[in-house]
Image (cartoon, helix red, strand yellow):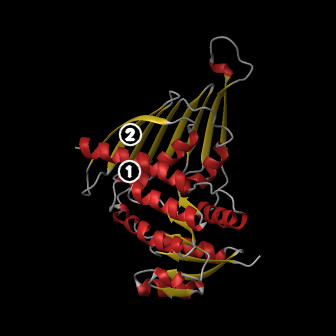
Amino acid sequence: MKPLRTAVVGVGYLGRFHAQKYAAHPDCDLVAVVDADADRARTLAEELGCEAWTDPRALFGRVDAASLVTPTRLHHPIALELIGAGLHLLIEKPMTTTLAEADELIEAAGGNGCLIQVGHLERFNAVMVAAATEIQRPLFIESHRIAPFNPRGADVSVVLDLMIHDIDLILELVEAPLEQMDASGARVISSDIDIANARLRFTDGCIANVTASRVSPRAERRMRIFQPNAYLALDLQAGVMDIQRRRVEAQGPPTMDQIEREKRDIDRRDALADEISAFVACIREGSRPVVDARDGRRALAAAIEIGQQLNRNAV
């Protein structure tokens, strides 16, 4: 098969990495990088041996697929044009700013036979991949995602910047509809919400308590999952999974000697390279993406509702 002709639209901090992964992928030909900053596009194009353009419409008829890594407010108009030209898209999270925009992209992609994958990168985190076979009917989930302040993500609230990663993971882990949520937060440094907590209740009784902060002295990404006869502590940053289980043969009231512990250091992987490889494979095979447009919309819907509550309740 011929290499997939690819491009990246928006080559700031994250888009640069997307371009590097396509350039290194054996089944891809990185044709171009596109950015409103001509100098930035040109510098990266020289590094990777591709074309540099400032207008996404220059991609029409020249590439098969692209990553869209612009500011979120530009996702909808640019994606709509690229889909209209028949391009498959990997759209960074959140996929759009509104549900109406997400619905329009989903409809357009279906009408043009285009695939949309949404860049919820934590789905490809090696710890989450390893934990997938261990997680069974969560009863309670607790997640913490905290980081030092970074102006790069301050154009949106901490919910769309950070919390949406865990919202997506939790909605995928719990096989029941979300029925209720309560959220609170505060503006600390920026003009938008910088620290937030949300409590999600699902129809099967599972509760998820989700905290995100971008005004913390250190970075941390942890998730704890409680399920029948087991507890999993996942350190998504350090690459560690700690499982405590009640022995299968245990009977009667629980005792300490019935609990067994397994701690695994998970081999590090390049999650972004895996995400892009999955995108390329889906295009070639015509298969469903790990995180498709409806998954992206589902996470966005919950994040928007949480954001609305925060705006009403924030201090």
Point out residue 25 in the picture as x, y percentages from the top left corner. Answer: 67, 73
Q: Are marks 1 and 2 in contact (CB under 8 Å)?
A: yes
Find disc 2 in the rendering and name its residue.
198
Q: Is residue 36 above or below residue 157?
A: below
Distance CA(mark 1)–CA(mark 2): 10 Å
* Number of residues whose C-alpha sits closer than 10 Å to that of mark 2, classed few (under 14), some (14–19) or many (20 or more): many
| Residue shown at 54% from the left, 81% from the top | 60
Q: Is residue 176 above or below residue 21?
A: above
Q: Is residue 102 above or below residue 185?
A: below
Q: Residue furthest top?
A: 252
Q: Give amino acid for label 1.
A: Val
| Residue shown at 60% from the left, 87% from the top | 49
Q: Residue furthest front?
A: 111
Mark 2 secondary-structure assignment:
strand
Q: Is residue 146 in view?
A: no
Location of residue 251 (image quadrant): top right
Q: Earlier in the sequence, mark 1 or mark 2?
A: 1
Q: Give amino acid for label 2.
A: Ala
Mark 1 secondary-structure assignment:
helix
Location of residue 4 (image quadrant): bottom right
Q: Is residue 120 above or below residue 207?
A: below
Q: Residue furthest left?
A: 315
Q: Residue furthest right?
A: 1
Point out residue 244 in the picture as x, y percentages from the top left corner. Answer: 63, 31
Q: Can you tell which mark lies on residue 159?
A: 1
Point out residue 89 in the picture as x, y percentages from the top left corner. Answer: 55, 68
Q: Can you tell which mark lies on residue 281?
A: none
Q: Quadrant of the N terminus?
A: bottom right
| Residue shown at 69% from the left, 41% from the top | 133
Q: Quadrant of the C terminus?
A: top left
Point out residue 135 in the picture as x, y percentages from the top left corner. Answer: 63, 37
